[in-house]
Amino acid sequence: MGGSDDPSNLVFLTAREHLIVHKLMVRHTEGAAKRKAINAYWAMASLRSKDTSGRLTLSTREFEKARTLMVKARTGVPRSDATKAKVSESLKRHFKENGCHNKGRSYSHLTKEQRSLTFGIGNKGRKQSQEEKDRRASALKGQKRSEEVRQKMRIAAAERERVKRLARL
C-alpha cells in the first residue's frame, strides 16, 4: 500500500490470511489500488507454480468471483503502447518456451456450446459500443442469412424471452 519494506513495517501472514487480506482490499480500495488488489486476488485464485504444496485451493464459487472481478477490472482500461509491447513480448516468450499456442489449432472437436463457454465467457454481458455494432454490421452487409440460421436466431430469441419471463416470476 505504498509503505516501506522495512521489517518493522511488515506483517507475516499465512497463505489463508494473505488471501483474506486481498479480498478485503478488493472491497475497501478504489482505482489503481483496487485493480492491484484484484490482480493479486486473481493470481492467488488461478495461477499455479511448479511446487503447488502450500497453495490455496479455492472453491468454485471463490474462483468464479475472482474471475469476474478480474474481467470487470480489465474491461475498458486503456493500455499504453509500451504496456502492449511488454505483454506481447512476454506472451511470445511464453509460447516459445512452453509451446502452448493456438496457431493452427482447431477446436472443431468441441460443440458450439462448449466453444461458447470456453472462449466467450469474458464477453458475457459486455455492452458493445455503437461504433463496434456499426463495424460488425458493415462487415456483414450484403450477406444473406440462410433459412437455417434465421430459424436458429428465432429459437434463440424465443429462449431469451422465456428466460426473462421465468426471471420475472
Image (tube, helix red, strand yellow):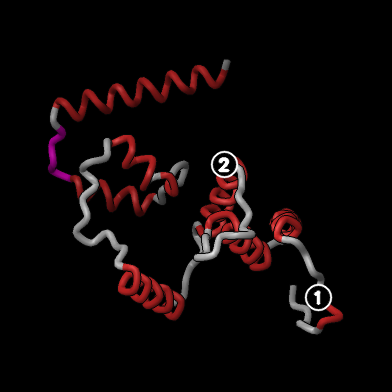
Q: CA distance from mark 1 to mark 2?
A: 31 Å
Query: Residue drawn 70% across and 60% down?
Result: 15
Residue designated by label 2:
60
| Badge 1 or badge 2: first in the primary sequence | 1
Of residue 66 and residue 125, the one placed in the foreground of this image is 66
Q: Amino acid at mark 1?
A: Leu
Q: Quadrant of residue 16?
A: bottom right
| The furthest residue to the right | 8
Q: Quadrant of the N terminus?
A: bottom right
Residue designated by label 1:
10
Would you call the spot at circle 1 few (<14 residues within 10 Å), some (14-19), or many (20 or more)? few
Q: Is 77 situated above or below 24?
A: below
Pinpoint residue 69: horizontal percent, then vertical percent.
58, 52
Q: Quadrant of residue 21?
A: bottom right
Pinpoint residue 17: horizontal percent, then vertical percent.
76, 58
Disc 1 secondary structure class: loop
Magenta part mainly helix, strand or loop? loop
- Decide whether residue 143 is among the magenta residues: yes
Of residue 113 and residue 84, the one placed in the foreground of this image is 113
Query: Residue drawn 27% across and 49% down?
Result: 136
Query: Residue drawn 60% across and 60% down?
Result: 53
Disc 2 secondary structure class: helix
Query: Residue drawn 34% across and 40% down?
Result: 116
Say the numbered circle drawn on residue 155. Answer: none
Of residue 57 and residue 63, the one placed in the foreground of this image is 57
Of residue 164 and residue 11, the one placed in the foreground of this image is 11
User: Which stretch appears magenta?
Assistant: 141-145
- Decide whether residue 68 is among the magenta residues: no
Q: Amino acid at mark 2?
A: Thr
